[in-house]
Structures are given as C-alpha cells and as structure tokens.
Image: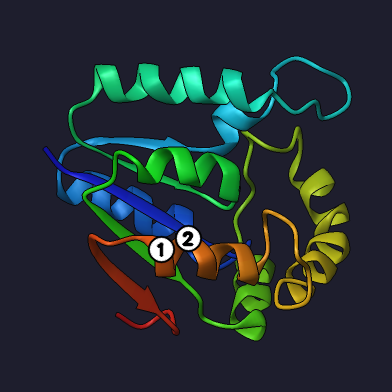
Amino acid sequence: MFRLVVFGNSGSGKSTLARAESVARSCAHLDLDSIAWEEGHAAPTRRTLETSGRLLDEFCARNTSGVIEGCYADRLELAMLRATEVIFLNPGVETCQANCRRRPWEPHKYFTAEAQQANLNMLLNWVAQYPHRNDEFSLQAHRRLFDGFSGTKQEYTSNVR
C-alpha cells in the first residue's frame, strides 16, 4: 500500500506532481476539489466536511494505493490519517503566480478558457495572500499539517526536484 498526499498553495504544482506520481506508480489520483464541492450548482457550493470525509473513505476503499492532492487543510487532515507519505509544495508566491499564468485551461473547473482567464487576477491576488491568511488554505495551516505529520515527508521550495 502506498498513499501520497500532496498539498500547497494554488499554483504550487500539486496537480502536475500528483498526476505524474499516480502515473509513475500506476495508482489512482484524487483531487480534493472533486470531493470538496457540489456538482451541478450555478454558484460554487461547498460540501460538508462529513460528506467530503465519506467520499474520501470511498476513494480509499476502492484504491489501496493512490495520490491525493489539494489545499483544504480540513480535508487534507482526513487524508493524512491514511497517508504513507506527504509532500508539501512551498515554492513561494512568485513561482505559484507564474505557474497560474502558465496554467492550461481546466475544463473541470471552468466552462471556457475565457472564463478561466477572466478569473486570473482574482487567483493571482488569492495566491499572494497565502503567507498572510490564517484560514484552511494558508501557509500557516499547511505548515501545521506538515510539521505534525510523523511519517515520511518532504517539502519542496522550488519547482525543480
């Protein structure tokens, strides 16, 4: 059994690394966005932590090995209870913003590439606040999770590995 949890700021490279690791290890990949948000609502609607936890349990029951990635500290905490290894991507705000600018269209998040581009300035501002926020998406929350994990763990402070 192998279960890797990858987390960090928006634009840190979580999805890229998680996809690469899941392919390299021939295992399932779970983006926490898929269990954190309700589908089919006109406005973004957050699932309860209980519902997200149940969906995470179902993923883990179906997949003895997998890579789980996201930025939600409360959901990450549940995932880390099952983790054999964690990776904290912490390359800095400037790198995250540059990655956001280069990000290809994400059809699972935006109906059109134009809609994604229209949201870019908001995302860049959101990324810039990472070291200053104290919510579940913050550097502070991610540092707490990383420091509290007693298993195998790595922190990357650049995109070069």
Depicted 134 relative to depicted 29: above or below: below
Query: Which color scheme did the rendering employ for the protein?
Result: rainbow
Name the residue carrying label 2: 145
Nearest the eye: 47 or 110: 47
Q: Amino acid at mark 1?
A: Gly
Residue shown at 50% from the left, 25% from the top: 53
- Quarter of the image that includes the N terminus: top left
The quarter holding residue 138 reads bottom right
Label 2 Cα neighbours within 10 Å, binned few <14 / some 14-19 / many ≥20: some
- Outermost residue, left direction? 1
Depicted 35 relative to depicted 115: above or below: above
Depicted 150 relative to depicted 56: above or below: below
Q: Secondary structure at mark 2?
A: helix
The picture places residue 26, in percent across and down from the top left corner, at 15, 39
Q: Secondary structure at mark 1?
A: helix
Q: Is residue 80 left or right of residue 99?
A: left
- Quarter of the image that includes the C terminus: bottom left
Q: Is residue 2 left or right of residue 61?
A: left
Label 1 Cα neighbours within 10 Å, binned few <14 / some 14-19 / many ≥20: few
Depicted 31 relative to depicted 62: above or below: below
Q: Are marks 1 and 2 in contact (CB under 8 Å)?
A: yes
Residue shown at 87% from the left, 21% from the top: 42
The quarter holding residue 45 reads top right
Q: Distance between the Cα atoms at labels 1 and 2?
A: 5 Å
The quarter holding residue 87 reads bottom left
Q: Amino acid at mark 2?
A: Leu
Name the residue carrying label 1: 148
Which mark is drawn over residue 161? none
The picture places residue 104, in percent across and down from the top left corner, at 60, 55
